[in-house]
């Protein structure tokens, strides 16, 4: 007669929602995912909502982030808004709360790559547009499109992320990827490029993902991190460096656990833990790991002096974090002002972005970064050779400059183009558009001023 135990061999041996995980490397047992991690509002205990950082919290950027008829308050002394009972007079930005169980924040969202982009609706329906020479639009062809076209075989997604020339999606804990696969970045065990999404096998339930140039990292529901693809600088975090991995490997280090957010960069990766510490690994020639050195690391190391991070991003050779007090700190390469500190000196430790406060969201591109303030203003800094800062010039900026876009909810930086989601839920794009990666129907080499991405069908 068998005995009832909590032991298991695989996820299907556990109750719905629970997962089979190794404990101390000796036995495997069924565990419940922590309740503070989420994909949708319904994953959180009321009245908490699911934030962009995929944790349950009482923080918001607009009324649309709240539920049960609540509204977004005016920012406190730290620039943080909270969902409260009341009316728009409390200082929130007007908007309609999403239905319970809907996406954490409403309307259209974007993921920007190099010469292509993707976007998804409030219902999760995915589209891509721009260059398609290796199938990165995911429609089963190699035909480019200046307008959004549906991604084949994906009816809905919870999250999308794009690398240089490939895309990935997250839906109900499962990850699918498509496009360029020569460095194993599709995670399907091959180095084959694919024009339609293919499942990444062998992953536990995933809650967050981020694509780097040619690699991907994900955070699972128990706080573990898995990466695959190019590993020339140790960006997969498993202790090796050199050969790529076409299958997910575990990024591990002593004390590195409880991860809730990941960020893929050029040849490095970063992660934020539930304690709001930040860890990075991989290439470090410019100090982009933030550990006070320029030594590459094949396993995660803790970024110096960051204990209050609420959002992170990684570029080609720099990294940034948004802190709880609404400030932004960056580290790494700074030749064109990527760190926003009014200098062009690299920094191997986090340095403060100047003249920027009350920030509610950030995004990091290849060599630029942008932030959204509580007022809805969008400010950007760094490289600008393709007009990606949105201020009508191609001059780099060593400190934040205002993008010519109205009040916005969030921002998404690609290699050399940028999207903002406005209060109306519309996408606007500026910067490089030579392949139609703005999705506006045109393809001038540079969009100096924001243009609207065509409405998704």
Image: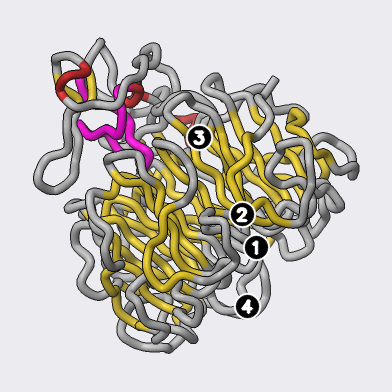
Would you name the residue on which mark 3 appears?
173
Q: CA distance from mark 4 to mark 3?
A: 28 Å
Query: Which marked residue is nearer to the observer: mark 3 or mark 1?
Result: 1
In the image, taking residue 204 as reference, residue 29 lies left or right, namely left
- Check if mark 2's residue and mark 1's residue have beta carbons within 8 Å: yes
Would you name the residue on which mark 4 appears?
232
Would you name the residue on which mark 1 appears?
386
Of pointers 2 and 1, the one earlier in the residue sequence: 1
Classify mark 2: helix, strand or loop: strand
The residue sitting at 46% across, 79% down in the picture is: 333
Expressed as whole percent of the image width and height from the top left, the position of residue 48 reads: 22, 26
Q: Is residue 272 magenta?
A: no
Classify 10 Å Cα crowding around label 4: few (below 14), some (14-19), many (20 and above). some
Expressed as whole percent of the image width and height from the top left, the position of residue 253 reads: 36, 70
The residue sitting at 61% across, 72% down in the picture is: 231
The residue sitting at 76% across, 46% down in the picture is: 436
- Does the image show residue 294? yes
Query: Which marked residue is nearer to the observer: mark 2 or mark 1?
Result: 1
Q: Nearer the viewer, residue 177 or 243?
A: 177
Label placed on residue 417: 2
Classify 10 Å Cα crowding around label 1: few (below 14), some (14-19), many (20 and above). many
Q: Which residue range is magenta in the image?
A: 47-63
- Check if mark 4's residue and mark 3's residue have beta carbons within 8 Å: no
Expressed as whole percent of the image width and height from the top left, the position of residue 430 reads: 61, 49
Classify mark 3: helix, strand or loop: loop
Look at the magenta stretch and give its main secondary structure.
loop
Q: CA distance from mark 3 to mark 1?
A: 36 Å
Classify mark 4: helix, strand or loop: loop
């Amino acid at each position: 007669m068998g005995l009832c135990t909590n032991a298991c061999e695989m996820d299907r041996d556990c109750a719905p929602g629970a997962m089979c995980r190794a404990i101390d490397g000796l036995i495997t047992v069924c565990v419940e995912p922590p309740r503070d991690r989420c994909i949708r509002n319904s994953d959180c205990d009321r009245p908490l909502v699911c934030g962009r950082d995929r944790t349950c919290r009482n923080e918001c950027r607009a009324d649309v982030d709240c539920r049960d008829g609540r509204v977004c308050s005016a920012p406190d002394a730290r620039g943080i808004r909270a969902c409260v009972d009341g009316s728009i007079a409390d200082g929130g930005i007007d908007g309609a709360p999403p239905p319970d169980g809907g996406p954490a924040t409403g309307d259209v969202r974007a993921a920007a790559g190099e010469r292509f982009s993707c976007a998804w609706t409030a219902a999760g329906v995915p589209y891509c547009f721009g260059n398609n020479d290796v199938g990165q639009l995911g429609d089963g062809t190699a035909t480019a499109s200046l307008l959004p076209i549906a991604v084949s075989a994906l009816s809905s997604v919870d999250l999308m992320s794009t690398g240089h020339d490939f895309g990935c999606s997250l839906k109900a804990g499962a990850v699918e990827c498509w496009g360029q696969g020569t460095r194993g970045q599709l995670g399907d065990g091959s180095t084959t490029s694919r024009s339609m999404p293919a499942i990444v096998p062998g992953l536990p339930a995933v809650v967050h993902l981020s694509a780097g140039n040619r690699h991907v990292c994900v955070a699972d529901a128990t706080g573990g991190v898995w990466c695959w693809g190019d590993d020339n600088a140790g960006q997969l975090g498993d202790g090796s460096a050199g050969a790529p991995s076409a299958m997910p490997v575990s990024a591990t280090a002593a004390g590195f656990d409880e991860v809730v957010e990941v960020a893929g960069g050029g040849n490095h990766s970063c992660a934020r833990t539930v304690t709001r510490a930040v860890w990075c690994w991989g290439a470090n020639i410019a100090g982009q790991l933030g550990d006070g050195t320029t030594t590459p690391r094949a396993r995660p190391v803790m970024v110096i002096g960051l204990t209050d991070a609420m959002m992170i991003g990684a570029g080609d050779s720099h990294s940034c974090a948004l802190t709880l007090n609404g400030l932004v700190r960056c580290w790494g390469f700074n030749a064109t002002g990527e760190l926003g500190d009014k200098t062009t000196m690299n920094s191997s430790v986090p340095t403060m972005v100047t003249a920027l406060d009350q920030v509610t969201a950030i995004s990091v591109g290849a060599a630029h970064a942008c932030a959204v303030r509580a007022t809805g203003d969008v400010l950007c800094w760094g490289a600008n050779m393709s007009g990606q800062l949105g201020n009508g010039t191609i001059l780099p900026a060593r400190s934040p400059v205002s993008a010519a876009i109205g009040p916005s909810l969030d921002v998404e930086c690609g290699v050399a183009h940028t999207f903002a989601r406005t209060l109306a839920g519309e996408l606007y794009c500026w910067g490089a558009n030579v392949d139609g990666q703005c999705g506006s129907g045109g393809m001038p080499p540079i969009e100096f001023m924001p243009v609207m991405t065509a409405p998704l069908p």
